[in-house]
Amino acid sequence: MQLTRFTDYAMRIVLYLGVRGEDVASVAEIADSYGISRNHLAKVAQKLAGNGIVEATRGRNGGLRLNKPPSEINLGQLVRTLEPDMQLVDCIGCLIAPVCGIPKPLAEATNAFLKVLDGYSLNQLIAASPNIETYFPRPIEPVAKPRRSVKPKKQSGKVSE
């Protein structure tokens, strides 16, 4: 069984945001923390926001934050939301599909996989990752640029009339 990179990135986003608590985080900040593509992560963040998992705020002070407490974010439900087709094999067009015994055990394995994930909340993942926040650098506050001093213009020496 293998999850898509999309779901992997979604789990990374919610873990990062769970560690951050109420603080907002930008897509760029999260992507830089993991060393992954900002563009791809932005698409994942959009899907998470569309499903009500994260709250996305636009603007200068905007960013992402969890839409509910980490204890209410279930890993199994997150995977189901992002991996709507969890079939391990595609039997469409297979000549032996009507009599094949392969799909049943694979469906059972998928259900067992999801049942295990159902037993975990984001809160539990954070608790099982001591000192994880030390791996996520805090954003550096932008330093205000000093104002340039305005030098008086040199006189040309001409006398105006």
Image (cartoon, rainbow, N blue to C red):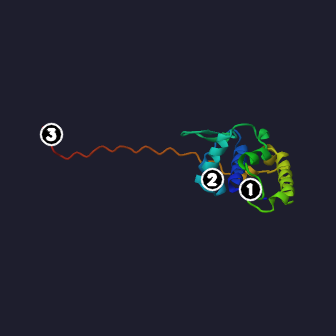
Q: Residue furthest left?
A: 161
* The C terminus - image quarter: top left
Q: Position of residue 133 (x, y in %)?
A: 72, 49
Pointer 2 or 3: first along the chain: 2
Secondary structure beneath dot 2 equals: helix
Pointer 1 or 3: first along the chain: 1
Dot 2 corresponds to which residue? 31
Q: Quadrant of residue 69?
A: top right
Give the residue displayed 54% in from the left and 40% down from the top: 60
* The N terminus - image quarter: bottom right
Q: Is residue 105 left or right of residue 70?
A: right
Q: Nearer the viewer, mark 1 or mark 3?
A: 1
Label 2 with label 3: CB-CB less than 8 Å: no
Pointer 2 or 1: first along the chain: 1
Secondary structure beneath dot 3 equals: loop
Q: Residues within 10 Å of mark 2 (few under 14, many from 20)?
A: some
Q: Residues within 10 Å of mark 1 (few under 14, many from 20)?
A: few
Dot 1 corresponds to which residue? 3
Identify the amino acid type marked 1: Leu
Examine the rendering and report whether any part of residue 146 can be seen: yes
Q: Residues within 10 Å of mark 3 (few under 14, many from 20)?
A: few
Dot 3 corresponds to which residue? 160
Q: Nearer the viewer, mark 2 or mark 3?
A: 2
Secondary structure beneath dot 1 equals: loop
Identify the amino acid type marked 2: Ala
